Image (spheres, rainbow, N blue to C red):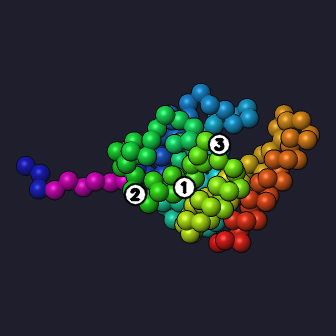
């Protein structure tokens, strides 16, 4: 008879395995998509929380895969991680800057702001692979403006 059961949260390695499965078949440029959120996690500032690292790895899961916030809860992620991931999930059709300012910055959630900044940085630095010149500059300006707004907020 068990008196109590120790429940553990997923490790960073567990989350990397999960995003490989969740984003299976998706591409970021010519690389497997999971390399994007992995790169975002690696751009977080030193000393970032484990919750921020998990959220960085899963920041596109709800938006770009069939997984839901409830699925993440059932996989053992804590409410804070799920809240950050939900904040980082842009509603379909939402204006990008209204979403960044109103939802992410407006939430006051520093982890969500830091993950979005790292996401913008990764996208900014990777922008343009195979894109026509005008599209590349437009994306780079978008990400630079978003990074500026986020940096002022945290």
Q: Residues within 10 Å of mark 3 (few under 14, many from 20)?
A: few
Q: Position of residue 35 (x, y in %)?
A: 64, 42
Q: Position of residue 142 (x, y in %)?
A: 79, 53
Whether the magenta-drawn stretch holds residue 51 is answered as: no
In the rendering, which numbered label is found on residue 79? Answer: 2
What residue sits 54% from the left and 55% below the top? Answer: 87
Up the image or down, 32 lies above or below 43; here it is above
Please give the residue where the numbered disc 1 appears in the rendered image. 87
Nearer to me, 140 or 14: 140
Image quadrant in which you'd find residue 92: top right
Alpha carbons under labels 1 and 3: distance apart: 15 Å
Q: Which residue carries the number 3 mark? A: 93
Q: Residue at x 71, y 72 (%)?
A: 152
Using residue 124 as the reference point, say whether residue 33 is left or right of it: left
- Sequence order check, earlier mark of 1 and 3: 1
The magenta segment is 4-9
- Secondary element at image label 3: loop
Q: Secondary structure at mark 1?
A: helix
Considering the numbered disc 2 on the image, is that residue within a helix, a strand or a loop?
helix
Mark in front: 1 vs 3: 3
Quadrant of the image containing the C terminus:
bottom right
Query: Could you tell me which residue is drawn at 58 percent across and 46 percent down?
Result: 91
Q: Earlier in the sequence, mark 2 or mark 3?
A: 2
Question: Outermost residue toward the right?
Answer: 133
Q: Is residue 32 left or right of residue 70?
A: right
Q: What residue occupies the far left of the structure in this picture? A: 1
Q: Is residue 44 visible?
A: no
């Amino acid at each position: 008879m068990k008196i109590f059961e120790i429940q553990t949260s997923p490790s960073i390695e567990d989350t990397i395995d999960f995003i490989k499965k969740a984003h299976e078949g998706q591409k970021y440029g010519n690389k497997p998509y999971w390399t994007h959120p992995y790169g975002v996690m690696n751009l977080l500032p030193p000393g970032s929380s484990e919750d921020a690292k998990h959220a960085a790895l899963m920041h596109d899961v709800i938006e770009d895969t069939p997984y839901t916030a409830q699925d993440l809860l059932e996989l053992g992620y804590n409410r804070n991680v799920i809240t950050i991931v939900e904040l980082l999930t842009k509603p379909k059709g939402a204006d990008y800057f209204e979403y960044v300012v109103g939802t992410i910055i407006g939430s006051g959630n520093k982890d969500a702001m830091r993950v979005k900044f790292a996401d913008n940085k990764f996208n900014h630095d990777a922008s343009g692979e195979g894109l026509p010149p005008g599209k590349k500059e437009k994306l780079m300006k978008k990400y630079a403006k978003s990074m500026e707004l986020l940096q002022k907020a945290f």
